[in-house]
Image (spheres, helix red, strand yellow):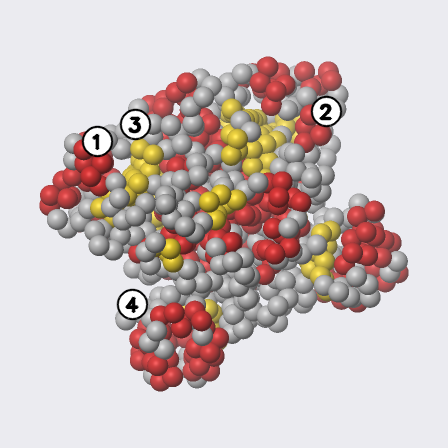
């Protein structure tokens, strides 16, 4: 039995953050019912500039809404909104990520919903928090990354470099899923519901907590990114990605003199003071960069791996898919689409009781389950 | 009102970041978390510093990851200690470990053995690359899992070498998934009384983190995505999405139609019908040339008046002075009692009924609670 079988989540959220939270709950067995606008649906279906479309819609919509159901109704219409009451009454949790004033205007705020279902676990994701002076700013992934200092962590040099993954959306969704699950746990014991909130900004600060903590506790001194092969400004040499003659390899925390001896890079053997590995990281990494260029990735790995040095070849996805290591994870699944086609995507990354959690439902057409839930027209 | 996970006992056998961060989140939500550590050294994270920062014998970073926990020192190779840990496990609701596959089995602390005496336990493990296959013994370290997962080809620009995500995000996302699996099994246990086993790995979690871009790739006839020539922020989003240099600093330009942007910037070259994805690099070049002619403040004003999504790019000095950060009220001092210097960190990102989850407590010294726990649980 999947752990969340029998639980129903009513999901008003759009784009990525909220739907990513409900995806995980769906992966683990919950019934997720999306509430979408008639006609256009979740705005992520028509998100601007996607690299891939299915049926004219943003393919990402399908990836993040796999295994969910959909009802469609116009939330601005009072009569239609009343049709939601039975769904709200029978839901275990609900999820929303509109701007706070929109949520309030639609009568979907916690206080109003609680009157209909006092034991509901209510989740709300915002960009910067409900009462924040920035509450009216767009809570968009890139913009929140940029506001939270995240562009000065990756790579080398002084120019801002954002994360090429939607981490603000994804982590806020993941924290929301945690909060909802903890809320459901208590509800199972006491019957009480609760309101769970998180924001993209708080999620960013949380994933930055190690490095931001180093900033806060180091006299609020910014750590410049390493000039040579920067990866994480707070880790000393050799931490980085290095070019070999035919590709790249990464080196993680490793005693520098030992690395020097193994690789035959004599200058490294002189750095016997551990504090220097951080304080003189660019100097050390410079020697290493020049040395590693002279051999192939294979050659270096053949020396380092048997010595239990933390190192790895840098793969792109094409190379990764060919590896036995990746294939043995059976990380991919095929999900059917309602038009008879199907697509490949990843599965839930969590295994429960030794089993992978695969999806049985496609991503829904707008209002696909209207009849089932008494929403017809 | 009781905390969400009040009364839940979590045993944390993990080291470093991924597992301990999951246990910390359960602690934030009200669980009681007990670290089980080797006498003498403890969690190796105690000595793993960021910026060489130490306090009171432990790295500042360790204290940030393990705030609010207790510490029980036990040598799992010593039969007496092992017996006491077994007794502790029988009283626990959750236990997590991140040893290499096989080690817990050797000590008789694997799920099959543990559930014989505690059928309700929710048992979590973290590995680098799963429990079977040729990579079982590969070191499960954040940067290594990132570069193996293909993530180094998403950040940075077209002509850059591979660039990793500059935070320990493989660890963070894996810890997050672990916490979700544990919580879901606790929810199920509330209905069935039976525990469960939760397994996560750094590589699987990294694939989930990249699931949108990676799934695009899987369904696109083998074409690898390209980072844009300049200001890349997402390989699968067209112009104008990205960051641009202005006369005095930088600006982020988010989603929106290139034509609308062209009208606001008064740039006729952007007013055509070019596809924002196919012509991404050409369009971004034109936008970059235009934005370089004036200041960030000027362009923010122009774009915000036109409701075009854009923003400033802060470093942490600028962020901590900004009104949004101040209003979040997110800083907390977790120094150990009677120490002089504060240790600042951020609060839990989850609010429950309007209140920040998580107490302002400190990380334990190694074995600080051993005697107390022995007495309390009759170990």
Give the vertical position of B227 relative to A359 (above or below): below
Pointers 3 and 4 in contact (C-beta within 8 Å): no
Pointer 4 chain: A
Q: Nearer the viewer, mark 4 or mark 2?
A: 2
Q: Secondary structure at mark 2?
A: helix
At x 61% / y 56%, what residue is drawn? B317
Pointers 1 and 4 in contact (C-beta within 8 Å): no
Could you give the CA–CA distance between mark 3 and mark 4, rounded to whole angstroms? Answer: 39 Å
Pointers 3 and 2 in contact (C-beta within 8 Å): no
Q: Nearer the viewer, mark 3 or mark 4?
A: 4
The residue to which callout 2 is attached is A105
Residue B376 visible in image: yes
At x 31% / y 75%, what residue is drawn? A258
Q: What percent of the width, then of the height, locates residue B136?
A: 31, 57
The residue to which callout 3 is attached is B194
Residue nearest the observer in this picture, A73 or A253 = A253
**Mark before the other along the chain sequence, 3 or 1:** 3
Could you give the CA–CA distance between mark 4 and mark 2, rounded to whole angstroms? Answer: 60 Å
**Mark before the other along the chain sequence, 4 or 2:** 2
The residue to which callout 4 is attached is A308
Pointers 1 and 2 in contact (C-beta within 8 Å): no
Q: Secondary structure at mark 1?
A: helix
Q: Secondary structure at mark 4?
A: loop
Pointer 1 chain: B
Could you give the CA–CA distance between mark 3 and mark 1, rounded to whole angstroms? Answer: 25 Å
Q: Secondary structure at mark 3?
A: loop
Give the vertical position of B214 relative to A154 (above or below): above
At x 35% / y 66%, what residue is drawn? A310
């Amino acid at each position: 039995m999947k752990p969340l079988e029998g639980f129903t989540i009513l999901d008003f959220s759009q784009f990525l953050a909220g739907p990513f939270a409900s995806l995980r709950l769906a992966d683990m067995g919950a019934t997720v019912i999306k509430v979408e606008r008639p006609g256009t649906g979740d705005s992520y279906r028509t998100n601007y500039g996607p690299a891939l479309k299915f049926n004219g819609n943003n393919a990402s919509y399908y990836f993040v809404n796999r295994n969910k159901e959909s009802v469609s109704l116009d939330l601005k219409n009072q009569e239609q909104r009343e049709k939601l009451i039975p769904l709200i009454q029978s839901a275990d949790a609900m999820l929303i990520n509109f701007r706070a004033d929109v949520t309030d205007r639609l009568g979907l705020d916690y206080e109003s919903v609680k009157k209909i279902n006092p034991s509901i676990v209510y989740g709300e994701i915002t960009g910067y928090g409900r009462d924040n002076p920035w509450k009216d700013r767009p809570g968009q992934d890139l913009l929140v990354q940029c506001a939270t200092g995240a562009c000065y962590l990756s790579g080398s040099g002084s120019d801002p470099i954002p994360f090429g993954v939607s981490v603000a959306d994804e982590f806020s969704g993941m924290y929301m899923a945690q909060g909802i699950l903890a809320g459901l746990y208590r509800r199972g014991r006491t019957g009480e519901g609760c309101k769970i909130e998180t924001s993209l900004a708080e999620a960013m600060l949380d994933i930055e907590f190690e490095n931001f903590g180093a900033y806060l506790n180091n006299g609020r001194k910014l750590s410049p990114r390493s000039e040579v092969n920067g990866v994480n400004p707070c880790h000393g040499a050799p931490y980085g990605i290095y070019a070999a003659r035919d590709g790249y390899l990464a080196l993680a925390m490793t005693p520098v003199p030992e690395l020097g001896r193994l690789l035959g890079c004599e200058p490294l053997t002189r750095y016997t003071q551990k504090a220097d590995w951080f304080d003189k990281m660019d100097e050390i990494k410079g020697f290493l960069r020049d040395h590693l260029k002279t051999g192939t990735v294979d050659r270096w790995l053949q020396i380092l791996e048997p010595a239990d040095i933390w190192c790895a070849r840098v793969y792109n996805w094409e190379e990764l898919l060919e590896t036995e290591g990746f294939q043995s994870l059976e990380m991919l699944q095929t999900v059917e689409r309602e038009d008879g086609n199907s697509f490949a995507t990843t599965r839930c990354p969590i295994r429960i009781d030794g089993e992978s959690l695969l999806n049985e439902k496609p991503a829904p057409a707008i209002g696909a389950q209207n009849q089932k839930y008494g929403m017809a027209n | 009102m009781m905390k969400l996970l009040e009364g839940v006992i979590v045993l944390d056998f993990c080291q470093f970041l991924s597992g301990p961060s999951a246990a910390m989140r359960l602690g934030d939500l009200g669980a009681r978390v007990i670290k089980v550590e080797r006498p003498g050294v403890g969690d190796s994270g105690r000595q793993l510093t960021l910026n060489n920062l130490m306090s009171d014998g432990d790295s500042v970073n360790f204290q940030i990851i393990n705030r609010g926990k207790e510490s029980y020192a036990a040598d799992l190779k010593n039969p007496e200690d092992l017996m006491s840990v077994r007794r502790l496990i029988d009283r626990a609701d959750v236990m997590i470990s991140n040893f290499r596959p096989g080690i817990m089995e050797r000590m008789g602390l694997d799920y099959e053995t543990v559930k014989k005496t505690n059928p309700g336990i929710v048992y979590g493990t973290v590995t680098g690359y799963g429990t079977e296959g040729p990579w079982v013994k590969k070191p499960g370290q954040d940067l290594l899992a990132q570069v193996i997962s293909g993530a180094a080809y998403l950040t940075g620009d077209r002509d850059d070498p591979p660039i990793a995500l500059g935070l320990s995000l493989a660890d963070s996302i894996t810890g997050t998934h672990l916490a979700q699996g544990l919580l879901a099994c606790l929810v199920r246990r509330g209905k069935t009384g039976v525990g469960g086993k939760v397994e996560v790995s750094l590589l699987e979690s990294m694939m989930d983190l990249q699931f949108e871009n990676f799934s695009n790739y899987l369904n696109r006839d083998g074409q690898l995505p390209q980072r844009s020539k300049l200001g890349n922020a997402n390989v699968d989003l067209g112009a104008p999405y990205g960051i641009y240099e202005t006369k005095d600093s930088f600006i982020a330009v988010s989603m929106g139609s290139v034509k609308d942007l062209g009208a606001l910037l008064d740039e006729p070259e952007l007013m055509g019908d070019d596809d924002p994805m196919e012509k991404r690099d050409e369009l971004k070049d034109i936008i970059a040339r235009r934005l370089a002619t004036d200041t960030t403040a000027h362009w923010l004003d122009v774009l915000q008046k036109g409701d075009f999504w854009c923003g400033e790019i802060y470093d942490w000095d600028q962020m901590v002075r900004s009104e949004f950060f101040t209003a979040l009220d997110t800083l907390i001092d977790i120094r150990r009692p009677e120490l002089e210097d504060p240790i600042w960190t951020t609060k839990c990102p989850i609010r429950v009924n309007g209140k920040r989850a998580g107490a302002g407590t400190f990380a334990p010294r190694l074995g600080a609670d051993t005697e107390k726990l022995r007495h309390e649980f009759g170990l």
